Every structure is written in structure tokens, then in C-alpha cells.
Amino acid sequence: MALESRAVPTGRTTPYSPRPFPTADGAVARRAYAVSTIGTKVILAVTGLALFLFLPIHLVGNLLLLVGSDTFNRYARSLESIPVLVPVAEVGLLALFVIHASKAVLNFLANRRARGSNYAAKRPATGGASRKTWASASMIVSGITIGVFVPVHLLQMKFGAYYPVTLDGAPARDLYRLVRELFHDPFVVAFYVFCMVVVGAHIYHGFASAFQSLGAYHPRYAPLVLLLGRGLGVVIGAGFLALPLVMYAAR
Amino acid sequence: MIVNPAPTRTAPKGMRIALRVWRQANATTRGRLVNYQLDDVSPDMSFLEMLDVLNETLIKKGEEPVDFESDCREGICGSCGLMIDGRAHGPLAGTTTCQLHMRTYRDGDEIVIEPWRAEAFPILKDLSVDRSAFDRIIVAGGFVSVNTGAAPDANAVLVPKGDADLAMDAAACIACGACVAQCKNASAALFTGAKVSHLSLLPQGGPERGRRAIRMVQQMDAEGFGSCSNEGECEAVCPKQISIGTIARMNREFTRAALDGAS
Ligand code: HEM
Ligand code: FES
């Protein structure tokens, strides 16, 4: 290949022009980083991992549903009673969610453009180094599904019916009853089970992918991180998915 | 590594191979897959020799031969590169197209051959693509500055053994473009990662380290390559089996340089 750029009639071949990172202006530099392919993936990784951290906490709390009505309602009330915790967490999660989802969609579209024309035949590589799975190939699908699930979930739970109950002599919201009634409906149960498989799949690839995006790679530990992420995807997916199933079975 | 299946030739005649080859007259016209039949393919032929035979028959018939690139035909130059049955460089790991041999196939097989497809690699003709985007990424920062004049003492600059090994592994990249071709995002992260890693690991070129990472990545983005989804398909098809660890290193180098305010 010749080093001087050849003029070609089609394609994206931009003539060589060194673009210095515009650092004179800090805001411009931050923007240049944020829109670069690597900066985009770093943002996806940081927001994705932060969103992920919420899930084990949420799961452990939800498992109290299996202990009983009072335990779960008491847990919910004590969470609410911690000053500023819930509002701050909600605003933070919303911001992470919006940034992650919008960056992910823009990134997906840019990546589609980068292929240009499609292959007539395309197959996964045969080498052992590939991490491609059904989960990695469908990140945009699982992501958009989560994007639909979360608002529905919030409408059903947080903004759902308010059943008052008296707990330890004080008024409280009977969230247990809300959940139990929701999971009486087989369609709701099926929807939740499906969405939790999807969340598990997103983590199955996303967890290790985020480490790689952040540049955390070590020949000895990278395979372990991959395994850990896949395990977390399965365990968290299965944990969340068990709740509607168990509550439906025990209705 | 895949073990090649033993040739299953019983008759003295060669194999019959059906080919579906992407034909496209030039960069601006639309291409399509065209069927060809070869009836006497020796298992000892390389894949490119098989295409040479195809071209001889086409020329004899007065037809336009299939345009494809090759140079060394010994797996070191990176010129050859075909999408063979949907896999960059074909079914074998750690192998360039020119090092793929017809003994990998069986009598009666059908093989689909396409060019690399990426917005940043425009198709020139048939199976040949313009990979000069890679050259421009190198020009943007893939070099080290040296003092000319008297030759320096060979061992004046010490390089830790581990770093030298990692740099050498990354330097094995032959810029064939298989990583881009195989990646679902047509990302050049493995190529650029290999080049950034190779040079950033060595003390030579240290002064350009931050600037190099910034400029090479920005050139990569400007060419229209996609981002890395960490599927590792690139490493799996790379004829030099370059590790995606080089991509992680590039991400670190780029982020660090951006934080440092390199330009
Ligand atoms: C609970 C919510 C979510 C969690 C925990 C989560 C987590 C993650 C993580 C850890 C990654 C890996 C980042 C990387 O590879 O660098 C990721 C990637 C991704 N996420 Fe999410 N995510 C969530 C919601 C969403 C939503 C709502 C979308 C909507 C479109 C989405 C779309 C994507 C896509 C497309 C990728 C892959 C990017 C790529 O590698 O090409 N995610 N996610
Ligand atoms: S022709 Fe040189 S690597 Fe194949």
C-alpha cells in the first residue's frame, strides 16, 4: 500500500489531516474524548458498571419478599426512612440510565454505518479467542428491552397502587400486597421472567466487556473476569426471575 | 488450532469446487456474487493458486479475471485477505488467506468468497479493497523520532524483557485488515491497538507517547471505523493472533493522554 492517500471515488477515505486533540479549551477536549470511539466505550463501561452495582442490592432486598409480608414492608419502610438516600439514588440511576442508553444507541448506529455494505455470508470466527455469544451479539436488543422494562416496572411498582397497612403500630405502604397481586397475573409473570433473562444476558457479556473497555486486561485474570461476568449474569438473572415464579406458584 | 481434515481423494482427478465470488467492476458500480465451477483442484494448491487457476480459465474464455491482492504468498506481507465462507482468511486460526490450502476442503464443497467490507475500506474491484486508511493511521502517529548521525550504542537504551516481548507480539501485526473485516462494527481497534501498544511499550518514541495515542485514535475514528464491542472476533481471526490486550492498552494510553492534555 502506498503511503500517500489515493483518491478513490467512493467510501469514507478522508484525506490525511492530523487533528490535534483540541486541548486549549477544556470543554472542547472533554467533548472530543466523549465522542471518540474509545471515550464512548469508557462512558458505556462506567455507567454500565454503576447501573450493574444497583442490581445485587435490589435483588437481595427483593428476596425478603420470600421471607414474608412484614419483613419486606419493614425493609421498604426503613430504606425510605434513611434521609436523602432514595431520592439521590433515584436521580443518580436515572442519569446513568439515560447516558448509558443514549450513548449505546448512538454507538450502535455509528457501528452499523462503519460496516457499510453487508456480507452475503458471515460466520463467527473459529479461533478460541472469540468471546462472541448470543448475548454479545444482541446487546442492543437486550439493552432496548431493559429500556422498555424499567419504565413499565416503575409504573407498576413505585407508581403503582398505594395499599396502606399498619406495621408495628405505624402506617406503612403494603408493597408486599402490590407485588403479590401483580404476580398473580400469568402474563405479568411471563413478562418479568423474559425481561430478567434479558437482563442476565446483558450482564453476561457486559460485565467483562466493561473491564476490557476500561483497559483492565491481564492475560491471567481476563479469562477469570469473563467467567465472573458470565456467572453474575446467570446468578442475577436467575435470582430475579425466581421471584415472580415463586410468588405465582405460592398464590 | 483447527486440525486440517485429511484429504479424501480416492480418484486420481482433483476436487470439484463450486465458487461463489464477489464481482464488482469498480468502486462505484454494484457488485454481485457470481458462480464458477472448478473441476480439477489439487489439494496441494494454496487458496490463491486455486484462484489463479480460476483466472487462467477466465482469461482463456476471454472473460475478466477476478481481481484479488497478494504479494509474498508466505503469510508475512498482509496483502492477501479474503472473506472465505463468512470468515476473514477462511476457517483456520492463525492463517492468512495465502497460507490456506485446498486440502482444508473436500470434493464438492461450495466456497463463498467476498472482499473485506468496511466503510473505511472501499472496494476497488472484485475482491480488492483500498486499505490506505491503515496507512493514514500509521502516518498520524505510528513512528518514533530518532537522532540521525553517529549510530548509537546498541545497548544504550535498556528495555525490560517483558516489555520487549509484549512489544514484539504487537509488532507482529501485518496490517492485513482481517480484524476490521471480521468485527461486527468494522472496528480497527485491534490494528490500532497493536500499533499503539508496540510503540508505547518501548522507551524509544517515549516523547511522542501521548500524542501518538491521541492522533492515531482520532485518525482511526475519522476514517469511519467502528468502536470495539469486546467480542474478540478480531483476535480469533488474526493471522498473527494478536491479543485484545493491545486494545485494552490503547484504551489506557488514549485515556491517560487525554487526561494529561496531550495533543
Ligand atoms: C440495568 C440496566 C443496564 C445495565 C446494568 C447495563 C450494563 C452494561 C454494561 C456493564 C455494559 C458493558 C459496557 C462496555 O462494554 O464497555 C453495557 C453495554 C451495553 N449496553 Fe447496557 N446496561 C443497562 C441498560 C442498557 C440500556 C437501557 C440500553 C439501551 C439501549 C443498553 C445498551 C447497551 C449496549 C448496546 C451495550 C453494548 C455496547 C457495545 O459494546 O457495543 N444498556 N451495558
Ligand atoms: S500474500 Fe503476503 S500475507 Fe498473504
Image (tube, rainbow, N blue to C red):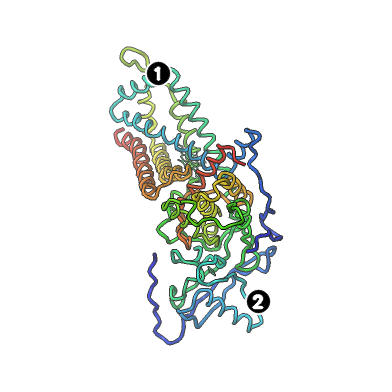
Query: Badge 2 local density, few (<14 within 10 Å), some, or many (20+)?
Result: few
Is residue A116 toward the left or the right of residue B43 in the image?
right
Residue nearer the viewer, B200 or A65: B200
Kindly identify which chain the residue marked by label 2 belongs to: B
Q: Position of residue A124 (x, y in %)?
A: 46, 59
Residue nearer the viewer, B158 or B217: B158
State the residue position of label 2.
B64
SS category of the residue bearing label 2: loop
Residue A82 shows which numbered tag? 1
In the image, is residue B85 above or below residue B231?
A: below
Q: Residue at x 55, y 71 (%)?
A: B72
Q: Residue at x 53, y 41 (%)?
A: B255
Query: Which image quadrant: the N terminus of chain A?
Result: bottom right
Q: Position of residue B58 (x, y in %)?
A: 61, 80
Q: Residue at x 50, y 65 (%)?
A: B89
Kindly identify which chain the residue marked by label 1 belongs to: A
Name the outermost residue toward the top: A169
Q: Position of residue A147 (x, y in %)?
A: 50, 38
The quadrant holding residue B241 is bottom left
Is residue B220 toward the left or the right of residue B46 in the image?
right
Query: Badge 1 local density, few (<14 within 10 Å), some, or many (20+)?
Result: few
Q: Position of residue B43 (x, y in %)?
A: 45, 79
In the image, is residue B175 above or below residue B140?
A: below
Asked if residue A109 shows in the view, the reply is no
- Residues at marks 2 and 1 on the same chain: no
| Pointer 2 residue Cβ closer than 8 Å to ligand 2 | no
Residue kind at label 1, given as amino acid type: Ile
Residue kind at label 2, given as amino acid type: Glu
Query: Which image quadrant: the C terminus of chain A?
Result: top left
Give the Cα distance between marks 2 and 1: 77 Å
| Pointer 1 residue Cβ closer than 8 Å to ligand 1 | no
